[in-house]
Amino acid sequence: MKIICIGRNYAEHAKELGNNVPTEPVFFCKPDSAILPRSNPLFIPEWTSDLHYEVELIIKIDRLGKNIEEQFANRYYSSIGLGIDFTARDIQEEQKKKGLPWEKAKAFDGSAVVGKDFIDLNEFSDRTNIRFSLKKNGEIVQDGSSADMIFNFDKVIAHVSQYMTLKIGDLIFTGTPSGVGPVKIGDTLEGFLGEKKMFRVNIK
Ligand code: ZN
């Protein structure tokens, strides 16, 4: 399986990092080795001094597809989860300046937190307004809604599938709202989809 991540999909977050709001989805990949094993802590890699959390809604692909039309994209996923796209912001800034790929900053071991449960989309009264949040040490640091995505789930699938075949089990991280920030040793991160707790990660 592969993990596809959408960048700059919330206008407020694009602005907080000084980026323009994109006119088409920006995406990059993480390998399956990036997934943080459940209940493991995340050890801050020694090569970064600015590791950031980015809480994101995750769609799970449950049907094989290529060149999927936006109007049919909703047939390719039926559940949603929550995770973190950990980013070594200092490394990413260096790579961006040099015009180099972001993998060093975003695809390292443990950089993808995937909450255990995926929730059937039929359980949401309005899938265009799915609320989610992240608490750091008990305080809310990010609070978002799918309503604020620049490119909704269907648009993301239509775009990415022009370039990559989507396979059953692939995950798409759909971008982070504003409020990203650094972690340090001893921090605890907890993610919530609505009121439901989806994961807890300890930073070591
Ligand atoms: Zn992200």
Image (cartoon, helix red, strand yellow):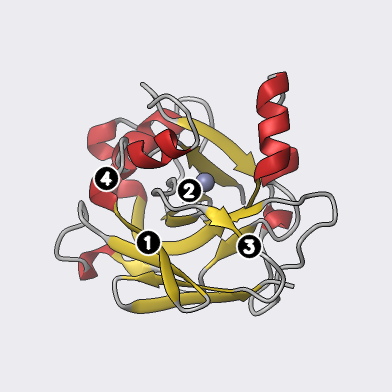
Residue labelled with disc 4 = 148
* Residue contact at pointers 1 and 3, CB within 8 angstroms: no
Q: Which residue is mark 1?
A: 80
Q: How far is mark 4 from mark 2, CA to CA?
A: 17 Å
Front residue of 18 and 3: 18
Residue at mark 1 to residue at mark 3: CA–CA distance: 25 Å
Instruction: Say which element carries label 2.
Output: strand
- Circle 2: residue type: Ile
Residue 141, position in %: x, y?
A: 43, 63
Residue 102 visible in the picture = no
Return the residue nearer the eye: 77 or 198. Answer: 198
Q: Give the crowd class for mark 2: few <14, some 14-19, many >=20 residues within 10 Å.
A: many
Disc 1 packing (10 Å; few <14; some 14–19; many ≥20): many
Q: Is residue 3 above or below residue 99?
A: below
User: Which circle's residue, 3 or 2, is located before the other in the chain?
Assistant: 2
Q: Is residue 62 above or below residue 73?
A: below
Q: Residue at x 72, y 24 (%)?
A: 100
Kind of residue sitting beneath label 4: Asp
Q: Amino acid at mark 1?
A: Ile
Q: CA distance from mark 3 to mark 2?
A: 23 Å
Name the residue beneath numbered marker 2.
172
Q: Residue at x 68, y 76 (%)?
A: 186
